[in-house]
Amino acid sequence: MDLVIDVQGITKRFGGKTVVNGLDMQVGRGEIHGFLGPNGSGKTTFIRMLCGLLTPDAGSGACLGLDVLRQQAAIRLQVGYMTQRFSLYEDLSIRENLDFVARLYAVPDRRAAVAESLERLGLAGRSRQLAGQLSGGWKQRLALAACLIHRPKLLLLDEPTAGVDPKARREFWDEIHQLAAGGLTVLVTTHYMDEAERCHRIAYIAYGSLLARGTVPEVIARAGLATWEIGGPDLPRTAARLRALPGLEQVVAFGGTLHVSTRDRARAQASLAEAFRGGAQRCAEITPGLEDVFISLMGAARDNFERGAAASETREEAPRP
């Protein structure tokens, strides 16, 4: 596989705390790679090291064939990075923002490139509108257009669909798949399980450490999780009773049902049989979903800030272009 990202042992520390702990990642050309984990897990810090905004304290490897420790400036020129927060100028129009970014990258035939970006992302009809007047979904389109104006080889997206409506999210992902089909490589962080399932492969980290990676079916299978769906009356009381039983690792509400999961199938079956003997609840084993797996992984992870240190994964606004 032609690897666009190939790094090993990437580590970053802030104030004596390890934020990214010996992380390995390989991402092939044209792949959409999901990067998942709870807030503060090190995702943003890792992305900033990949694109040359931060220098790793340890580890090695390449991004776009360039050394992540020594060729950061060259990497930045070939990467499009969409930050968590909208970082373009709100007092400039859509066209003016794109033109400004194109100037920064010295894009050839800048006016044509801006016009093409406006058309591709459906922004042409709003080109004169100020960025600050846009809704979340339109700001997302503008940010993506700005990331693509210099034709990068790698797209880094940090929670790009947070706060946008389902229709905008779907349109955004349709565009990402079209870009990947054209050979663009995408690394995207997300908290949405349906978005994770749209990725070719995923990696899951918690508190700076890699816990799982592979395709979605591979990650679910390797978790070794058994899950049951519980239905019936008075589910809050049922949940409280189940949480006190041995062998049940997690009891989580899913709409009008409960999901009960564990890695100790035999012990859980005994507990469930006893709990529902002669009761009105329904209990059926189901295939665990990605969310069941991730909740289980989180429960097994150790918080590297549990002694009260300040949160490490800084969320300051990214520098403007």
Image (spheres, rainbow, N blue to C red):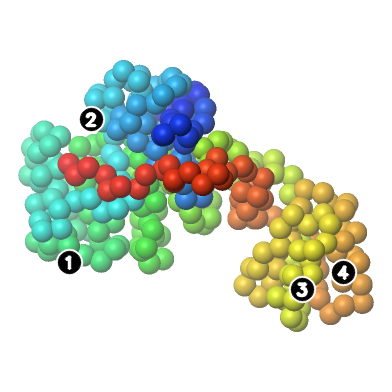
Q: Residue at x 65, y 50 (%)?
A: 299
Amino acid type at circle 2 is Leu
Determine whether the residue tagged by mark 2 lies in a helix, strand or loop.
helix
- Are the residues flagged by discs 2 and 4 in contact, CB closer than 8 Å? no
Q: Which residue is mark 3?
A: 238
Q: Position of residue 282 (x, y in %)?
A: 80, 73
Quarter-of-image position of residue 162:
bottom left
Residue 167 lies, with reference to residue 47, above or below; the image says below
Indicate which label's residue lies in the foreground, 4 or 1.
4
Amino acid type at circle 1 is Gln
Q: CA distance from mark 1 to mark 3?
A: 48 Å
Q: Position of residue 279 (x, y in %)?
A: 87, 77
What numbered label is drawn on residue 133? 1
Amino acid type at circle 4 is Ala
User: First in sequence: mark 2 or mark 3?
Assistant: 2
Q: Residue at x 28, y 24 (%)?
A: 72
- Are the residues flagged by discs 2 and 3 in contact, CB closer than 8 Å? no
